Image: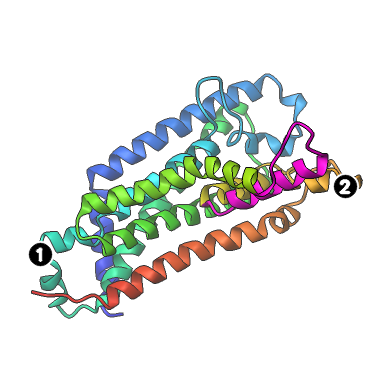
Amino acid sequence: MGGLGVVLWKELNDNFSSKRFFIMFLIICFVGIAACYISAQNLRGSLEEFPTEQVFLRLFVVSGESIPSFASFLAFFAPLLGVIFGFDAINSEFSQRTVSRILAQPLHRDAWINGKFLAAFVTLAIMLTSIVLIIIGLGIAILGFPPDIGELARIGLFLGVSVVYVGFWLALGVLFSILLDRTVSSALASIAVWIFFSFFIYMLAGVIADKVVPLGPKATVEAWVRHSYVKDLVLRFSPTTIFNEAISAILIPTYRGLGLMALLSGEEIPSGPLSIGQSLLVVWPQLTVLFAMALICFAISYAVFMRREIRT
């Protein structure tokens, strides 16, 4: 892939000097700092109520009265980050009629699309890493002690899952940028998918569960269990739901991801916190699916672009 490095560095320079990067970074930085500050202030007065190894993790999951937690905000806002950096990655070059001139250079077509995607992916990864480091630094300043190794490992995993999650939406934006010629159309299509998986799928899951397992005034416990199972199964088609389940197990050591069926089985369930390895086993399917979705989405983009005709 000759020329990949050249495209990568050129696109990185364009991304970091663009207004969209500055605006997106300010928004996520402001919300992240505000959520961390409120969480730290709430935790500072009640440190004795929580295990020491969980305090820094709660900075990412505790919400205030008027602002959500950083993890909840990221689950909602991260898709927009990926879409904004991907919806015009390809079709903007076609609309400006610069593609033929670029590919007329000693530059392979696959190097060009790979370089553009990697540059946007690295930009988003650096953005999220910077925000997480700022939150850790602010937490140290307010709480008065640093996180331990276990907390740092879980925060690192949370950051890695968040980057993969953003990468999926970036790949989706790039896919629509290849399939649709107009940037407005690709942006609307990407946002429509985000709205469906973030809002409408909850209504759809309820409707499907009501149709498959109707609940009446005399519904049994087994019927309620099956109804909840069907609803959860439909919701797991949403990458947002998968991301929320993954980060819940990573940032909340006591999370076990148990469904209603397991809770009603009568078996004794340990209440202590899980180790980081056990937490990974709980959400290993979610992590695998999230990574596979991002990889498949970019693979489709790559295959479609490589077969696309480039005219002068």
In this rendering, would 212 be left or right of 254?
Answer: left
Residue 241 located within the stretch drawn in magenta: no
Q: Vertically, is 118 above or below 245?
A: below
Q: Residue at x 58, y 48 (%)?
A: 235
Question: Which mark lies nearer to you, 2 or 1?
Answer: 2
Report whether residue 127 is seen: no
Quadrant of the image containing the C terminus: bottom left
In this rendering, would 95 be left or right of 34?
Answer: left
Q: Vertically, is 195 above or below 111?
A: above
- Earlier sequence position, callout 2 versus callout 1: 1
Q: Position of residue 249 (x, y in %)?
A: 68, 47
Q: CA distance from mark 2 to mark 1?
A: 63 Å
Picture quadrant where residue 5 is located: bottom left
- Residues drawn in magenta: 212-238
**Label of residue 265 in the image:** 2
Picture quadrant where residue 260 is located: top right
Q: Residue at x 25, y 76 (%)?
A: 109
Q: Vertically, is 190 above or below 108?
A: above
